[in-house]
Image (cartoon, helix red, strand yellow):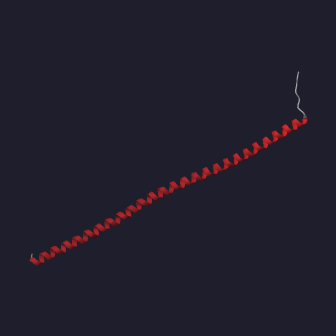
Amino acid sequence: MDAEYISRSEHAEFCKRVDAEDERQNKRLELLEENTKQINSLTTSVEKLAQSIQLMCKEQEQQGARLESLESRDGEMWKQVTGYVLTTVIGLAIGFFFKQFGF
């Protein structure tokens, strides 16, 4: 058996390198865990924002429908008033015509 042994100092150096690598890996894991927490928080915020926008969109559609009905009601009322005025003017003209010609 031809075995190669390493010295204690080489073993100590190797252990230091392994420990340093473990520390680096642990720090990387901590950073990844923190990033994962931030991503989860961001995802939750985006979900809440999407729900809020969806509710606002529905409310805006309802307000648009109400506004349209209000605008059309004013338009209908204006047409009705215009019709009454036109009918009155025509009635006055016919009355004047009949009065002038004695009918």
Q: Quadrant of residue 28?
A: top right
Q: Which residue is found at the position 54% from the left and 56% from the top?
A: 52
Q: Is residue 63 above or below residue 21?
A: below
Q: Which residue is found at the position 67% from the left and 49% from the top?
A: 37
Q: Quadrant of residue 71?
A: bottom left
Quarter holding the C terminus is: bottom left
Q: Which residue is found at the position 38% from the left and 64% from the top?
A: 70
How far from the left and from the top, in percent, is residue 102? 9, 77
> Which residue sits furthest left?
102
Instruction: Depth check: give the residue in front, 28 or 87.
Output: 28
How far from the left and from the top, in percent, is residue 53? 52, 55
Instruction: Depth check: give the residue in front, 33 or 83.
Output: 33
Residue 1 horizontal side relative to residue 84, left or right: right
Q: Which residue is found at the position 78% from the left and 41% from the top?
A: 21
Q: Quadrant of residue 75?
A: bottom left
Q: Is residue 92 above or below residue 62?
A: below
Quarter holding the N terminus is: top right
Residue 83 horizontal side relative to residue 36, left or right: left
How far from the left and from the top, in percent, is residue 33? 70, 46
